[in-house]
Amino acid sequence: MRGIQRIRPLVGFELEGATLTLSAERYDDPPRIESIHYDIAIRGEADEDQLELIHTNLQRFSTIYNILAPGTALDGVVRRGDDAD
């Protein structure tokens, strides 16, 4: 979520809020997280191109994403959300 706040001025849209939903596949033997799926719903005035730019920047520059990516399958979406999400 911090990454979205950091990227917002570069992309140029008003952020009203965001919701992050994560699900992970975990194994006990050996202990590891096999995969993580994320859904980021952005509330604000971002258009589809801006949402794609946010997603690309999060994948490239997010510390947590880059720590997990080498050993964990990561996939997800950044999409427009509303208060019903």
Image (cartoon, rainbow, N blue to C red):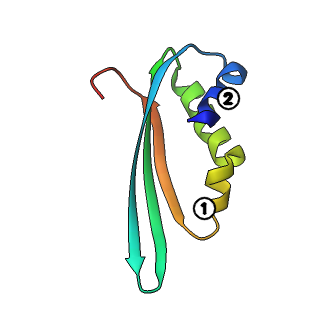
Could you tell whether 73 is left or right of 68 in the image?
Answer: left
User: What mark, if any, has residue 7 been given in the picture?
Assistant: 2
* Three-letter amino acid code of the residue under disc 1: Leu
The answer to which of 26 and 8 lies nearer the viewer is 26
What residue is rendered at 52% in x and 58% in y?
Answer: 74
Q: x and y percent of residue 19 in the render?
A: 42, 33
Could you tell whether 49 is left or right of 27 in the image?
Answer: right
Q: x and y percent of residue 70 in the render?
A: 64, 67
Q: Secondary structure at mark 1?
A: helix
The answer to which of 77 and 67 lies nearer the viewer is 67
* Residue farthest bottom in this picture: 29
Could you tell whether 70 is left or right of 85 in the image?
Answer: right
**What is the CA distance from the residue labelled 2 to the residue labelled 1?**
20 Å
* Residue farthest left in this picture: 84
User: What mark, if any, has residue 55 been given in the picture?
Assistant: none
Q: x and y percent of residue 66 in the render?
A: 67, 56
Q: Indicate the quadrant containing the N terminus: top left, top right, bottom left or bottom right.
A: top right
Q: Residues within 10 Å of mark 1 (few under 14, many from 20)?
A: some
N-terminal-most mark, 2 or 1 = 2
What residue is rendered at 70% in x and 47% in y?
Answer: 60
What residue is rendered at 54% in x and 67% in y?
Answer: 72
Could you tell whether 69 is left or right of 77 in the image?
Answer: right
Q: x and y percent of residue 23 in the render?
A: 37, 55
Q: Residues within 10 Å of mark 2 (few under 14, many from 20)?
A: some
Q: Indicate the quadrant containing the C terminus: top left, top right, bottom left or bottom right.
A: top left
* Three-letter amino acid code of the residue under disc 2: Ile
Q: Secondary structure at mark 2?
A: helix
* Residue denoted by label 1: 68
What residue is rendered at 66% in x and 16% in y?
Answer: 12
